[in-house]
Image (cartoon, rainbow, N blue to C red):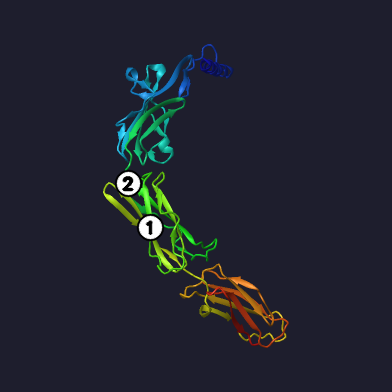
């Protein structure tokens, strides 16, 4: 009723304004003007003093065949990964359930599986002919899904029965880490473990939940003091078919892969991960070098003359020591920065400078923990 009162007040105001602008009793009458709104539920449309109520309903059909609250579906029992067309009719219940046409109506579709990304649908749908149609695709959803259409306060729904997907194969997901440090040599920037992930999918490539997966390793060094291990040898695929395990490095420099296996209706299915390199052990004396950018600086009794000193380190396999190793420096003449940390190229640089004590041949010593867990020293002298 409030909608009708507001509409008439607007019409009277317009008439009064025209009269104030010079209209008289002989003036032509105003043409009917109308305003309308629609958001589901009951709305009103005004044409002069005539008010027409619009009560939005969602369902199937129109007129005498209209059934409120239902979504029309081509099929209600879908195979895994199957599709169906969904239709909902937007009607004016106050006008004999006639289709609402001539203006846009936006209908939204939702469901639990849609929110979980295990079903796909086009939504919202805008219609001007009173029929909103969309396509629903199962993408891992089962065994049922209740789809709801809404327009304002009007709703309709349909329940779909969806066959459970069956595992067809398992596929490897690209690695985020393909090189890790050996056991005992890891750091935050280069850990000694890497996560390996796979996806269990059906024939349509959609993820399958609840499938048992077994993991094993290939490529490990059988003579390693500490072997490569897996965080878990078995796991169950989660929503979306994802399953993972952790590769924990051993003590040897090697390359490994993870093999993932599942049982399907066609038998056992296997796949391998991308390779993971385990490398860069601890330094050895035969691969530890110190150099200077100037071995004969002009620095006799002159303070503050700099010389850059670089250290290069490899392990017993000739591989660069990739970080996580600190080298200590001492000198018996001048002064030197006390330490530096090897980078991924197996090198780091400090600066020596001339000052007291004055020596014509100061000796700089670099040291770190070597292969035999003992303090090893490498020396170089400058001639001033």
Secondary structure of the residue carrying tag 1 is strand
Give the CA distance from mark 2 to mark 1.
20 Å
Foreground pick, 211 / 359? 211
- Residue at image coords 44%, 64%: 227
Q: Is residue 211 visible?
A: yes
Vertical arrangement, residue 61 with respect to residue 364, above or below = above
Quadrant placement of the C terminus: bottom right
Q: Is residue 105 visible?
A: no
Q: Which residue is mark 1?
A: 216
Q: Quadrant of residue 364?
A: bottom right
Vertical arrangement, residue 276 with respect to residue 57, above or below = below
Side of 29 relative to 382 (left or right)? left
Secondary structure of the residue carrying tag 2 is loop
Vertical arrangement, residue 344 with respect to residue 43, above or below = below
Vertical arrangement, residue 28 with respect to residue 173, above or below = above
Sooner in the amino-acid sequence: mark 2 or mark 1: 2
Residue 167: which numbered mark, if any?
2
Q: Quadrant of residue 342?
A: bottom right
Foreground pick, 224 / 273? 224
Indicate the position of residue 369 as horizontal and vertical percent values: 57, 73
Indicate the position of residue 9 as horizontal and vertical percent values: 55, 16
Foreground pick, 64 / 301? 301
Foreground pick, 352 / 8? 352
Q: Quadrant of residue 289?
A: bottom right
């Amino acid at each position: 009723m409030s909608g009708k009162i507001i509409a008439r007040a607007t019409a009277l105001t317009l008439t009064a304004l025209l009269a104030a602008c010079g209209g008289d009793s002989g003036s032509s009458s105003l043409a009917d003007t109308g305003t309308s709104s629609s958001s589901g539920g009951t709305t009103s449309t005004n044409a002069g003093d005539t008010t027409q109520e619009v009560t939005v309903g969602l369902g199937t059909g129109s007129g005498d065949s209209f059934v409120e609250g239902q979504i029309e579906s081509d099929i209600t029992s879908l195979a895994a990964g199957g599709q169906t067309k969904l239709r909902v009719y937007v009607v004016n219940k106050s006008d004999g359930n006639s289709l609402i046409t001539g203006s846009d109506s936006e209908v939204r579709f939702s469901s639990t599986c849609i929110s979980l990304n295990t079903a796909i649908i086009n939504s919202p749908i805008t219609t001007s002919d009173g029929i909103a149609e969309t396509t629903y695709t199962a993408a891992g959803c089962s065994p049922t899904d209740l789809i709801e259409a809404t327009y304002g306060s009007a709703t309709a729904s349909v329940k779909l029965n969806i066959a459970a997907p069956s595992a067809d194969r398992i596929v490897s997901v690209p690695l985020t880490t393909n090189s890790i440090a050996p056991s005992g040599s890891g750091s935050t920037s280069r850990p000694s473990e890497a996560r390996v992930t796979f996806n269990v999918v059906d024939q349509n490539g959609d993820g399958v939940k609840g499938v048992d997966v077994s993991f094993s390793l290939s490529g490990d060094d059988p003579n390693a003091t500490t072997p490569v291990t897996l965080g878990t040898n078995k796991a169950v695929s989660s929503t979306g078919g994802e399953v993972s395990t952790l590769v924990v490095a051993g003590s040897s420099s090697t390359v490994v892969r993870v093999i993932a296996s599942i049982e399907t209706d066609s038998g056992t299915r296997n796949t391998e991960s991308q390779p993971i390199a385990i490398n860069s052990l601890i330094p050895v004396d035969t691969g530890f070098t110190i150099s200077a950018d100037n071995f004969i600086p002009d620095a006799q009794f002159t303070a503050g003359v700099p010389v850059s000193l670089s250290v290069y380190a490899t392990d017993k396999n000739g591989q660069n020591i990739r970080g996580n190793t600190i080298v200590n420096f001492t000198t018996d003449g001048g002064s030197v920065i006390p330490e530096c940390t090897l980078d991924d190229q197996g090198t780091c640089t400090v600066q020596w400078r001339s000052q007291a004590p004055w020596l014509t041949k100061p000796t700089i010593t670099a040291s770190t923990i070597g292969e035999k867990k003992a303090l090893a020293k490498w020396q170089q002298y400058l001639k001033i």
